[in-house]
Amino acid sequence: MCGEYRKPIRNVSLVAAVEKRLLSDLFFTDKEVSTPSREGDSIVIVGGELFNKGAQAMTFTVVDQMSKRYPEKDVYLLSGRDYERDPDEKAQYEFNILPWGPETQLSLLSPELDFGNTTQYPKQDKKAVKNVLEDCSMLIDINGFALSSQMGAKTSFIYLTDILIAGEYDVPMYILPQSIGPFDYSSASKLLLNPLMQTYLSYPDVICPREQAGVKSLAPYTRNNVRREFDIVLQNEGYDPANIYTSEPDLERKDLESEAVGIVPNSQVFERTDPEELYSVYDAAIEALLENGKTTYVLRHSIEDLDLCREIEKRFSENDNVVLFEEDLNAIELEHIIRQFDFLLGSRYHSLVHAYKNQVPAIAIGWAVKYRELLDRFDQSAYFFEGRDEIDEQELVSAVEQMCNSYDCESELIGEKVDEIQQNDLFGDLFDD
């Protein structure tokens, strides 16, 4: 079967398999929600990955926290993109990486419809996933932003299929802090997704929206298992590298000069507005920073933002006080850099989280409600700019100048809030016996 035909047939087959399970659960099965036993030998993470550094930070956080609590269990990250990494690169991690995605989901739900050794994953790799789920003590979802019409109906379908599979294998499931909603799908998509949400969103032991908007979006489908929480990276002070890496990692510790400010763009914002207008906004912000004696560092927090960083820096290529970091730094290395900034002009959500976690103020250019709610909860809403709307350059420049004068004061306010947040212990509440 040619690859170009295999993928759409696979997708239709997966929809059919999910619909079959849905009808069975609705009309033919009196299935009770499982009680967490945690008796299996594996802990499975879905929704995490290592290319986006926010997702990487969440993955590292869960691996570290669960390894501390369950040192006898094996931790698995299910991630299609990361599974395709070079074997030597994967070998540096203490956790295991197995494939995940529609093809693997189909092999679990309807093996008779599986296409065997496809160009994506050999059959034995998908069998390995099945073996892990059959001996799984818990499945932990750390999608940053997936169950939402803003991310598309297909992404939401794959997300809900993860929950269905957890139920199918009687694996307790925990959906850790993430952005959820809105659910403004097309009428056709609602016909598919609404029954899945009505049936399966009550299955996880807990669903933790980061925003009140997420709590509201979930209310028509489930309430008793919903618990609003701050981001897990923000709640936790740091990682033990020994739980993440097989040997002491050779981390790159970049030390910056004083009067440093960071810029972290986001391709998601550029896709939702006029790119040239947004580049002009960054030009104006950098010019204001230079006039205030700041050295500006442009860096990526996700692999797809490198070209944006290069373009922003290129417009100031003759100025030595605008510096580009092109390296693919990991979450630990990025956090080391961010904590040295006076403040950050950030568009990646977890670049803001890393900033606040280290008492570094931020000006945010966002594209979803999660940005506004994060800044609201830190009393920083004056520094939020909606990237989907036209940004007034002068207003942004005024915010930059204000921050240049008040970042010390803002840092103290943020530090007080972080201390309060880190009094919470979500992992202890959920996983300590």
Image (cartoon, rainbow, N blue to C red):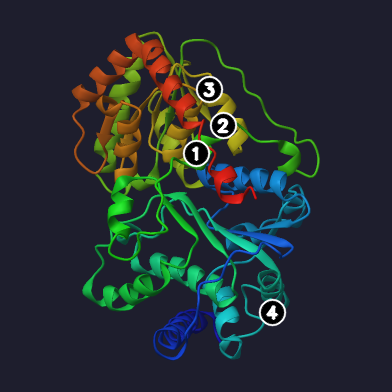
| Residue 74 occupies quadrant | bottom right
Q: What residue type is labelled 3?
A: Arg
Q: Residue at x 56, y 30 (%)?
A: 335
For the N terminus, which image quadrant? Answer: bottom right
Q: Which residue is drawn at 29% across and 57% down?
A: 217
Dot placed on the residue nearer the N-terminal end, 4 or 2: 4
The answer for how far apart the CA atoms under marks 3 and 4 are is 45 Å
Q: Residue 91: x, y in percent?
A: 77, 52
Location of mark 2 (residue): 334
The answer for how far apart the CA atoms under marks 1 and 2 are is 8 Å
Query: Quick one: SS at disc 4?
Result: helix
Location of mark 1 (residue): 301
Query: Quick one: SS at disc 1?
Result: loop
The answer for how far apart the CA atoms under marks 2 and 3 are is 9 Å
Answer whether labels 4 and 2 touch (C-beta < 8 Å).
no
Q: Which amino acid does label 4 sit on?
A: Lys
Res 123 label: 4
Of residues 200 and 12, the one drawn nearer to the viewer in this rendering: 200
Answer whether labels 1 and 2 touch (C-beta < 8 Å).
yes
Of residues 80 and 76, the one drawn nearer to the viewer in this rendering: 76
Location of mark 3 (residue): 339
Answer whether labels 2 and 3 touch (C-beta < 8 Å).
no
The answer for how far apart the CA atoms under marks 4 and 2 are is 37 Å
Of residues 300 and 151, the one drawn nearer to the viewer in this rendering: 151
Dot placed on the residue nearer the N-terminal end, 1 or 3: 1
Query: Quick one: SS at disc 3?
Result: loop
